[in-house]
Each structure stands twice: as C-alpha cells, then as structure tokens.
Amino acid sequence: MFLSDANRFFKRLQAKGKRKLEEKQKLREKIWETLEKKGVARFPLPVRGRIPNFEGSGKAAKMLASIGEWEESEVIVANPDYAQKKVRELALKDKKTLLMATPKLKEGYLKIEPERVGGKEEFASTIRGAFKLGEKIKELPPVDLIVTGCVAVDLKGRRLGKGGGYGDREIAMIKEKYGNIPVATTVHELQIVKKIPWEPHDQEVDIITTPKRVIRVKN
C-alpha cells in the first residue's frame, strides 16, 4: 500500500514537472516569434533557441550602468550572449573586472581585467575577444553584481532562460558561495510578461532594465 501510494505521488510530481516544462517552452516560442514579427529582434538571427538580442540592447545596458549597484560594483559577472554584449563592454570601460561565463560553462569562466584591454573593450566583450584578452580561472573571486540573460521575465523577478539551465545553476552557485548578490537582466519591453511558469529551483532577478526604464523587483 505504501509503495503504491509513493509511486502514485511520484508520478503526479513527474506529470506536474512535465507540464511546467511544456508551459515554459510554449512561452519561449511565443517570445521568439513576437520579437521577430515585431521587427525588434537583432543579430544573431533567428533568435529561436537563443537569449534574444533586441533593438535597443545598448540603451538597456546604459540604463543598467546608471544605477547605484553598478556604480558601486568592482567585479561583475555576465553571461556571454550577444544581447548583453554592450553590458560587458560598458563594464570594462567603467574599469570593472569582468567575469564572463564561457558558453554552456564548458570551460568555466574568463576573467577580463580592464587595464589589459584599454581601447579594445568592444572586442574584449565578444566571446572570441574574451578568450584572447582574458584568462581562464578555476575559481570565481567575490562578485558584486550578476548580470544574466533572459528570454522572458515577469515583474516578480521570475526569469525564463533558453532552456539549458545554465543561468540558474550559475546564479545559484555564486549566491551559495558569496551570499545574496543582486541579479540584473537587460530585456526588451516585449520580453516582460505577466507570469513566468516557476519551479523551486528557478532563480530570480532583482533588477530589470529595458531601453526605456529601470524596474526594481519588490517581493
């Protein structure tokens, strides 16, 4: 009896988890399609399967660079996606140490020091440039601000990545090691949705910037 009850309970959990995954993927597809149909998706195209780059991503990065948490930060860790390329460039121009996750975290992190890339910040903010001008590190130093990419986000700070789980793992790992560090993302207004399907392991953001505004999440 106990075994059959446990099996039924486990099957319900599996079914619930499957539904959440399906809801998340449906929302991703909707956002990717909307960005392209509205003509705001930018290189690299198509955006399906990616953290989408968008019209005004540079303005959203400048919005992020205007807030107090950015100004007070000395070390910023950022995702490698093209949508946040300007964020990484501005970090180096503002003389901040940039830690960049390698794609899918296959080679850990790269550390790019601003004094090593003087005048080459734009190149250093690319994946190829970071590998050339940065150095691979085995262990992350203390971090002041985490910047993550999103396919979609809601006003509660719940984020939706592209489906690999790397962003969630990265944020969770850094917070476990260094505490409650602020997490920010840059998105287009069309990427802000009413509700993100959420699971307990999903990580959240504290700050959202778009080309038009700064949103501080209140939980």
Image (cartoon, rainbow, N blue to C red):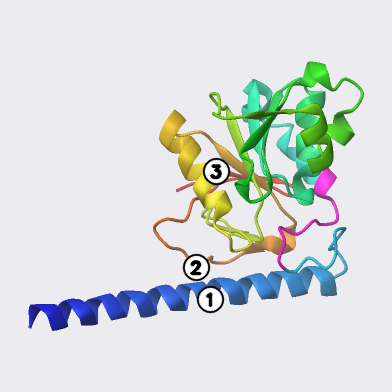
Asked whether disc 2 touches disc 1, contact meaning CB atoms under 8 Å apart, the reply is yes
How far across and down, in percent of the image, does residue 185 sit? 65, 46
How far across and down, in percent of the image, does residue 180 sit? 45, 34
Residue indicated by mark 3: 206
When asked about the image quadrant of residue 65, the answer is top right
Please name the residue shown 68% across and 74% down the image.
29
Cα separation between marks 2 and 3: 17 Å
- Between residue 200 and residue 18, name the one nearer to us: 18
Dot placed on the residue nearer the N-terminal end, 1 or 3:
1
Magenta region, main secondary structure = loop
Magenta-highlighted residues = 49-58
Numbered disc 1: secondary structure:
helix
How far across and down, in percent of the image, does residue 212 sit? 77, 49
| Residue farthest right in this picture | 119
Residue indicated by mark 2: 197
Numbered disc 2: secondary structure:
loop
Cα separation between marks 2 and 1: 7 Å
Asked whether disc 2 touches disc 3, contact meaning CB atoms under 8 Å apart, the reply is no
**Left or right, residue 209 beside residue 41:** left
Dot placed on the residue nearer the N-terminal end, 2 or 1:
1
How many other residues sit within 10 Å of disc 3, few (<14), some (14-19) or many (≥20)? Answer: some
Cα separation between marks 1 and 3: 23 Å
How many other residues sit within 10 Å of disc 2, few (<14), some (14-19) or many (≥20)? Answer: some
Residue indicated by mark 1: 23
When asked about the image quadrant of residue 100, the answer is top right
**In the rendered view, would you say 180 is above or below 209?**
above
Q: Quarter of the image containing the N terminus?
A: bottom left
**Left or right, residue 104 beside residue 196:** right
How many other residues sit within 10 Å of disc 1, few (<14), some (14-19) or many (≥20)? Answer: some
Q: Which mark is residue 199?
A: none
**In the rendered view, would you say 2 is above or below 78?**
below
